[in-house]
């Protein structure tokens, strides 16, 4: 788990980790913008197959929203595209507007993003001056807290949201709702699921955790030796746990064997890691 520094792309972090750990198979669990900092989870070796479950976890962010200025990237890295006189906007108005953007909302992804349309990433098209229509996507904003600062046009924010939510888009939507425009700056991802920035490490101090610990946000099911053998061979099982899944199946020794998902009234393997050592 890395505390990504500003100025690095998520790909930069992966490339650096490959060199430090001597392992080509390294991936990450969700892109952070180059100017953003904070929690970036890496998967190493065969355990990269678990990353999709980590990507699906909710995220928490802090940052600042600047009212009155729009940019082409929706954040401070972009070119200013519009200015608005918003000095008379009150903190109460900002809180009301933020509250309206909380819950299940439909969000249009920004052009400068890693989403692919027609086989091309949006940020690649944006660099070419091409803008394409993007369908709004359902996301969930669990919490959108705003607090005034010493600058009447700048608000500190804390956002807890589902995977796939763009805080930049939230900032822009907030500005629009207030009758003007806005952009985001100083974005920091403070948590991915239960993984917090307090646990993250710098790039020169990476710590590898066991696969079972990586799946700690999912229901764990400990199986006996006989079932462990069936899991190692990817057999379909009876329903695993009490919840809807996915389930992290652990052997009697506590090692992660596999991740299973619901399959009708039964459970089927999504990823089997039994007999595969971390980083192998």
Image (cartoon, grey):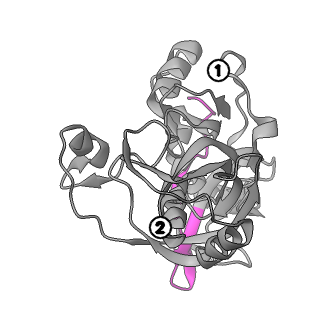
Answer with left or right where residue 199 lies relative to residue 154. Answer: right
Residue 80 in the image: above or below residue 233:
above
Residue 254 spot, x, y in % from top left: 80, 49
Q: Secondary structure at mark 2?
A: helix
**Mark 2 or 1: the one toward you:** 2
Quadrant of the frame with the N terminus: top right
Answer with left or right where residue 65 lies relative to residue 146. Answer: left
Residue 87 spot, x, y in % from top left: 61, 58
- Judging by the rendered image, the residue that carries numbered circle 1 is 203
Identify which residue, 157 or 221, lies in the foreground: 157
Q: Is residue 267 magenta?
A: yes
Distance between the alpha carbons at the discs numbered 2 and 1: 38 Å
Circle 2 packing at 10 Å, graded few (<14), some (14-19), many (20+), is some
**x 75%, y 62%: residue:** 220
- Judging by the rendered image, the residue that carries numbered circle 2 is 176
**x 28%, y 48%: residue:** 122
Quadrant of the frame with the C terminus: top right
Residue 270 spot, x, y in % from top left: 50, 60
- Quarter residue 216 falls in: bottom right
**Earlier-in-chain disc, 2 versus 1:** 2
**x 72%, y 18%: residue:** 205
Circle 1 packing at 10 Å, graded few (<14), some (14-19), many (20+), is some
Can residue 130 be seen from the camera position used here? Answer: yes
Residue 8 in the image: above or below residue 166:
above
Identify which residue, 71 or 42, lies in the foreground: 71
Q: Secondary structure at mark 1?
A: helix
Can residue 255 be seen from the camera position used here? Answer: no
Q: Is residue 187 magenta?
A: no
Q: Which residues are magenta?
A: 260-280
**x 20%, y 50%: residue:** 119
């Amino acid at each position: 788990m890395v505390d990504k520094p500003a100025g690095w792309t998520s790909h930069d972090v992966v490339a650096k980790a490959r060199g430090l750990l001597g392992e080509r198979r390294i991936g990450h669990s969700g892109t952070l913008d180059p100017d953003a900092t904070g929690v970036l989870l890496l998967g190493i070796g065969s355990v990269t197959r678990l990353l999709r479950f980590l990507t699906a976890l909710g995220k928490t962010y802090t940052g600042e929203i600047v009212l009155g200025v729009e940019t082409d990237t929706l954040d401070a890295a972009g070119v200013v595209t519009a200015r608005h006189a918003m000095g008379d906007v009150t903190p109460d108005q900002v809180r009301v507007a933020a509250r309206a953007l909380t819950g299940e909302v439909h969000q249009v992804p920004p052009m400068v993003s890693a989403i692919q349309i027609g086989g091309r990433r949006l940020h690649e098209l944006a660099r070419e001056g091409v803008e394409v229509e993007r369908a709004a996507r359902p996301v969930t904003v669990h919490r959108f807290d705003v607090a005034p600062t010493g600058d009447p046009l700048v608000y500190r924010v804390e956002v807890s949201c589902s995977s796939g939510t763009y805080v930049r888009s939230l900032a822009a939507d907030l500005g629009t709702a207030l009758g003007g425009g806005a952009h985001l700056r100083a974005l920091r991802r403070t948590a991915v699921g239960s993984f917090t920035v307090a646990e993250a490490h710098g790039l020169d101090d990476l710590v590898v955790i066991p696969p079972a610990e990586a799946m700690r946000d999912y229901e764990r099911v400990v199986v006996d030796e006989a079932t462990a053998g069936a899991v190692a061979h990817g057999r379909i099982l009876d329903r695993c746990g009490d919840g809807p899944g996915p389930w992290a199946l652990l052997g009697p020794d506590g090692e992660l064997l596999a991740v299973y998902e619901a399959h009708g009234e039964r459970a089927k393997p999504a990823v089997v890691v039994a007999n595969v050592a971390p980083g192998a």
